[in-house]
Amino acid sequence: MNSNGPYRCWAEISGAALRHNAQVVRDRVGNIPLIAVVKANAYGHGMIGVARALVNDAQLFGVANLEEAQALRKEVSQPIIILGPALPEERAPIATGGFIPSISTLEEACEFNLAGKNTPVAINLVIDTGMGRMGVVQAEAAELFRQIVALANVKIHSVSTHLPVSNEDEAFTRSELAQFSELVKKLRAEFPAKFEVHALPSAGVLAYSDPPFDVVRTGLILYGISPLAEFQKLLRPVMTWKTHLALIRDMPPGHGISYGRTFITPQAMRVATLSAGYADGYPRHLSNRDAAVLVRGKRCPLLGRVTMDLMMIDVSHVEDAVVGDEAVLMGRQGDQEIPVTELAERADTITWEIITRVGSRVRRVFV
């Protein structure tokens, strides 16, 4: 039983691994400010615990929305950048909360100008260099910049962009960064306003950090997952996702396992039921995809379909397995490991989705 509590399903989060990965970033970009991106519950790792672990490593924190910013403000004193667009009703509390909103339009800037009558609002102006998600298109950026700096209650804290294919298309990314750099030079030459520049996400830090601009904005890399496979060896995975064997039964040959009877026992098998399922975030798409779980350091195949609260595995070859044993859904146990990349590949998705889907009833235990 886990010494931290009788949890049915939990994720152990390593503070030492978080700090190691932050140092990897520092080794690559030097002593420039680091935005630790802790949106989406710190990519599923637990926002408050992660922020506490990185409080001496991060100079700023990045979140997705106002709600996350307000929760984080209770724990950290660093500036907090809201990376997603604000809803109209969120603009006033963003201003009064002292958060840094990300904006794309003059309309947003004017609304924050009204909200900042008592205290000027520092904003992050996003340039759309190819992502198509938010930001002013590059050709219109200089004019929008000119209009914003004329507003009395708004100041430009930073200018940023987002790289859509930094882990897929090197040629496009290098061209995108070169054009963005030229735009930044133009803005700095034409306008007296002082501002920071950030463009590099995790893949950018690893592969395109010459130059790194003024600030780097790292998420996935902090959690020990490289978006570029060749750099994975530098990082330490932060999360080990665990559950328990809740039941062990000897099943006869020809017996169906789980909904749909998509797996029929080919011979007598020892089948364990785990106290986790897709309601905990374990992907149902791993059903019948040769996924495995670790029990006593051995890989145990997943059998049949993952259900809401339970899933079944073959422990026929783990003779000493008993009810209550820890089972590792993701991470290392003994000499064996089930990396997040394996789960993502077999579920036909991306690593980001695997970790951010780890459910709210999965207890985060910081170790």
Image (spheres, rainbow, N blue to C red):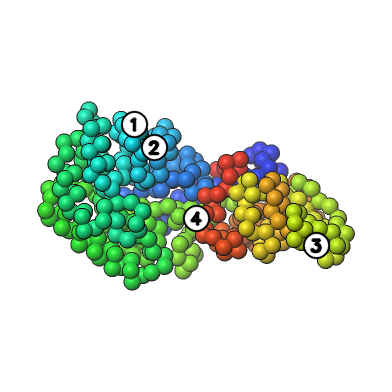
Q: Which amino acid type is shown beneath numbered disc 2?
A: Leu
**Relative to the observer, which residue lies in front, 210 or 149?**
149
Q: Which amino acid type is shown beneath numbered disc 1?
A: Pro
User: Disc 4 or 3, which lies upstream in sequence?
Assistant: 3
User: Disc 1 or 2, which lies upstream in sequence?
Assistant: 2
Q: Which amino acid type is shown beneath numbered disc 4?
A: Trp
Q: Position of residue 9 (x, y in %)?
A: 65, 45
In whole angstroms, how far apart are the C-alphas of marks 1 and 3?
57 Å
Which residue is at 49% across, 58% downward? 225
User: Disc 1 or 3, which lies upstream in sequence?
Assistant: 1
Residue bearing mark 4:
352
Select label 3 or label 2 by which is in front: 3
With respect to residue 143, does 94 lie above or below?
A: above
Secondary structure category for the residue under label 1:
helix
Determine whether, in the image, residue 257 is placed left or right of residue 77.
right
In the picture as drawn, the residue positioned furthest to the top comes out as 118
Secondary structure category for the residue under label 3:
strand
Residue bearing mark 2:
66
**Relative to the observer, which residue lies in front, 234 or 170?**
170
Residue bearing mark 1:
93
In the picture as drawn, the residue positioned furthest to the bottom comes out as 171
Crowdedness near tag 4: few (<14), some (14–19) or many (≥20) residues, C-alpha within 10 Å: some
User: Disc 3 or 2, which lies upstream in sequence?
Assistant: 2
With respect to residue 37, does 91 lie above or below?
A: above
Which residue is at 27% across, 41% downward? 108
Contact, mark 1 vs mark 2 (Cβ under 8 Å): yes
Which residue is at 44% across, 56% downward? 221
Specify the quadrant of the image occupied by residue 88: top left
In whole angstroms, how far apart are the C-alphas of marks 1 and 2?
8 Å
Q: Which amino acid type is shown beneath numbered disc 3?
A: Ile
Select label 4 or label 3 by which is in front: 3
